[in-house]
Image (cartoon, helix red, strand yellow):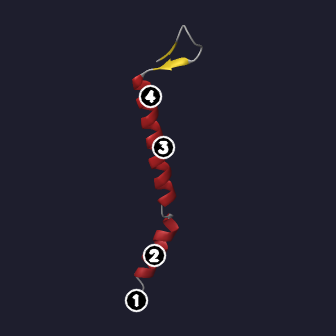
Amino acid sequence: MIRRSRRSSAPEVSGPDIQAAEHEAAKQRILDQAEAERTPVDDVTQAVRVGRRPR
């Protein structure tokens, strides 16, 4: 919940709001990192095919 202080025009943010925003930011960082480290399916399929070649 955002409340406006009588002394200033800037909104006051409560503790739970800050925690929720920090949680969402952390979640987004984790998702971005996972996407950056993801191996494309085509690369995995090719690796599996190479590993199954008869010798």
Determine contact: label 1, label 2, CB under 8 Å: no
Residue 27 sits in which quadrant?
Answer: top left
In front of the other: label 3 or label 2?
A: 3
Going from N to C along the chain, the mark reached first, 4 or 1, is: 4
Q: Tag 2 or tag 4, which sits nearer the N-term? A: 4
Which label sits in the foreground, 4 or 2? 4
- Residue 53, compared with residue 26, is above or below; it is below
Inspect the image, locate mark 3, and give the three-letter code of the amino acid beneath it. Gln
Q: Residue at x 40, y 25 (%)?
A: 16
Number of the label disc, if any, that sits on residue 28: 3
**Contact (Cβ within 8 Å) of mark 4 with mark 2:** no
Say which residue label 2 marks: 47
Name which residue type carries label 4: Ile
Q: Real-space Cα distance between discs 4 and 3?
A: 15 Å
Indicate the amino acid at tag 2. Ala
Instruction: Estimate how packed mark 1 is, as few (under 14), some (14 to 19) or many (20 or more) residues with alpha carbons within 10 Å.
Output: few
Which is nearer the eye, 53 or 34? 34
Q: Which mark is residue 7?
A: none
Q: Earlier in the sequence, mark 4 or mark 3?
A: 4
Q: Residue 51: x, y in percent?
A: 41, 81
Q: Please say if 37 is above or below 7.
A: below
Tell me the residue that label 1 is attached to.
54
Task: Please give the residue where the numbered disc 4 appears in the rendered image.
Answer: 18
> What's the distance in space between the residues labelled 4 and 1, CA to CA?
58 Å
As displayed, is residue 29 above or below residue 53? above
